[in-house]
Image: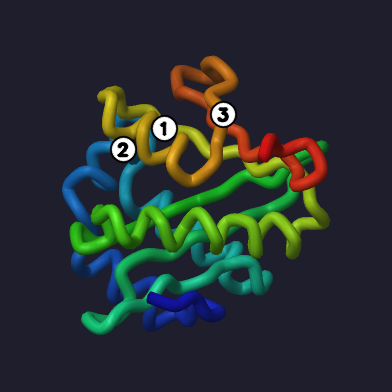
Amino acid sequence: MRARTATVGDLEDVFRHLSKRMSDEYIAAGKDSKIAYDNLMMNLKEGRAHALVDSDGTVAIVAWHEHGDAADTLFAAREGFFRAATVRFCRRHIRQIQALAGNLPIHSRSWLTGPEIAKWFRTIGYVERGEENGAKLFELPPAATRPG
């Protein structure tokens, strides 16, 4: 797996084959896939979106934008993204995004519940920080404050 700057084609491909769990996440957040697509497109046009690519093509788009004292993430994925190897890759890659965002804490949210979601975030290095607007808020602390 590798990451590279996302293109409009990458975004279109991921949304053409968007996983059901991503659709469910957007609905739980009170949005639909069109709003998520538009938000990701805005970040892509600003150069703040990466495509995660494996041998089958683009499996996910991760975007970020600085918001106050943290960088918030946006995400879309095909079903093929949700594997242990991909989550492990994201552990390294999210740190690259953090460096691009000036070593700010990274904030990610999930409106879905289930033990596997918290486990994925913990595996990547996030710490659960409570709830915000109906979502669980996960934070990747800045490198200097990260344990271990």
Q: Is residue 97 above or below residue 134?
A: below
Which is more foreground, mark 3 or mark 2? 3
CB contact under 8 Å: marks 2 and 1: yes
Q: How many marks?
A: 3
Q: Name the kind of residue labelled 1 in the image.
A: Ser
- The quadrant in which the C terminus is found is top right
Q: Residues within 10 Å of mark 2 (few under 14, many from 20)?
A: many
Residue 110 is labelled as 1
Find residue 5 and report its image quarter. bottom right
Name the residue: 59% across, 21% down: 129
Please tell me whether mark 1 sits on a helix, a strand or a loop. Answer: strand
Expressed as whole percent of the image width and height from the top left, the position of residue 147 reads: 69, 35
Q: Which residue is the site of mark 3? A: 127
Q: CA distance from mark 1 to mark 3?
A: 13 Å
Q: Earlier in the sequence, mark 2 or mark 1?
A: 2
Q: Nearer the viewer, residue 21 or 126?
A: 126
Figure check: 27 above or below 49: above
Q: Which mark is nearer the camera, 2 or 1? A: 1
Q: Secondary structure at mark 2?
A: helix
* Real-space CA distance between mark 3 and mark 2, rounded to the nearest whole angstrom: 20 Å
Judged from the image, the secondary structure of the residue bearing numbered disc 3 is strand
Q: Residue at x 37, y 77 (%)?
A: 53
Residue 28 shows up from this direction: yes
> Where is mark 2, residue-wise?
25
The answer to the question of whether label 3 and label 2 lie on touching residues, with beta carbons closer than 8 A, is no
Residue type at mark 2: give it.
Glu
Q: Is residue 38 left or right of residue 103?
A: left
Residue 145 in the figure: left or right of residue 73: right
Residue 103, percent from left and from top: 79, 52
List x then y, in percent, for residue 125: 54, 41
Disc 2 to disc 1, C-alpha distance: 7 Å
Q: Is residue 18 above or below residue 117?
A: below
